[in-house]
Image: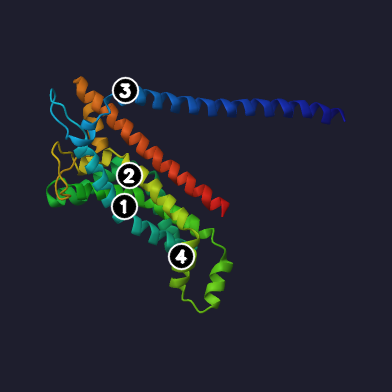
């Protein structure tokens, strides 16, 4: 009894200490996020105007906006999504439905884990050597390919994890009705986890939207408005990186405004992904 009585206060004290540390870490994280968002709002909100969305970037002394950068970000993200989404979803489907624990599946998972943690600048250098050097010029297409390499691993992991949550009884019931494996996956498994796959796509878009390093080596940037993916193209991360180093106040203000727009776009995508995840849990 004495030993047990002495043990309880120590466990209680240890529990209190770790609880306080956990709450402290949470408060610190929330405080840092609040400071970052407050700083963005303080420095970027004042620069929001119609010119930001209707005018292209301009030299110092001229009123400009971020139209070409916003359009460029959308175009390269769409290119990355068009390339990465089919690859990611199909690879995740293979791992969950066909590969299981085969040697090829183990290799694919290992490579996917490496790509998930690979520095984006390494991916940018790889695509630079593969496409830019080979073709002989920078292009938005090369930028989109580099974004696809960064976004596809997220979709692979999400698709595999979601499909693994589908009960085998659903697959067996569909197979008992005479449906081939491909139709079982398409009409049963995909429908059951459609929200989860869409969540993975949204998270991949959020990752691709904020990347700067790979675009420096692939898309380069462009002060003119263009929708031709075969040539250099501007993007919000590129213009933020460039204008943040500028000595001119108007360009620094545009950099803060661009950062504000980009941050809230990514936050919006993250909130949508969480809402979809919550709907999956409720189902």
Give the x, y percent position of residue 157.
44, 53
Q: Is residue 14 left or right of residue 191?
A: right
Q: Which residue is mark 4?
A: 99
Give the mark nearer the N terminus: 2 vs 3.
3
The outermost residue toward the front is 50
Q: Which residue is mark 2?
A: 208
Q: Which residue is mark 3?
A: 43
Q: Residues within 10 Å of mark 1 (few under 14, many from 20)?
A: many
Give the mark nearer the N terminus: 1 vs 2.
1
* Residue at x-position 15% and y-position 41%: 225
Q: Residues within 10 Å of mark 3 (few under 14, many from 20)?
A: some
Give the x, y percent position of residue 261.
31, 34
Which of the two discs, 1 and 4, sits closer to the camera? 1
Which of the two discs, 2 and 4, sits closer to the camera? 2
Q: Which residue is mark 1?
A: 81
Q: Is residue 120 left or right of residue 12?
A: left
Q: Is residue 218 left or right of residue 174?
A: left
Report the Cα–Cα distance between label 2 and label 3.
24 Å
Report the Cα–Cα distance between label 1 and label 4.
24 Å
Q: Which type of secondary structure does the marked residue at label 1 adopt?
A: helix
Which of the 4 quarters of the picture holds residue 54? top left
Does 191 sit above or below residue 265? below
């Amino acid at each position: 009894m004495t030993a047990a009585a002495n043990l309880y206060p120590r466990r209680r004290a240890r529990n209190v200490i770790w609880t306080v540390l956990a709450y402290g870490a949470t408060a610190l994280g929330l405080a840092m996020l609040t400071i970052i968002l407050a700083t963005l709002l303080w420095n970027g909100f004042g620069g929001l105007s119609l010119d930001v969305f209707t005018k292209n970037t301009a030299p110092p002394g001229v009123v400009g906006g971020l139209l070409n950068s916003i359009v460029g970000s959308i175009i390269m993200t769409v290119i990355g999504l068009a390339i990465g989404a089919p690859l990611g979803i199909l690879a995740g489907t293979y791992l969950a439905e066909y590969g299981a624990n085969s040697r090829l599946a183990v290799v694919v998972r290992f490579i996917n884990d490496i790509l998930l943690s690979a520095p984006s600048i390494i991916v940018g250098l790889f695509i630079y050597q593969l496409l830019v050097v080979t073709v002989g010029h920078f292009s938005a297409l090369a930028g989109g390919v580099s974004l696809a390499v960064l976004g596809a691993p997220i979709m692979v992991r999400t698709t595999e994890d979601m499909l693994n949550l589908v009960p085998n009884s659903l697959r067996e019931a569909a197979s008992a009705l005479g449906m081939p494996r491909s139709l079982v996956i398409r009409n049963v498994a995909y429908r059951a986890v459609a929200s989860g796959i869409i969540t993975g796509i949204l998270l991949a878009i959020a990752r691709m939207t904020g990347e700067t390093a790979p675009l420096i080596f692939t898309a380069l940037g462009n002060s003119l408005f263009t929708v031709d993916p075969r040539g250099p193209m501007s993007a919000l991360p590129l213009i933020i990186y460039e204008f943040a180093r500028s000595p001119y106040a108007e360009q620094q203000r545009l950099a803060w405004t661009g950062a504000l727009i980009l941050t809230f776009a990514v936050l919006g995508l993250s909130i949508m992904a969480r809402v979809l995840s919550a709907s999956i849990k409720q189902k």
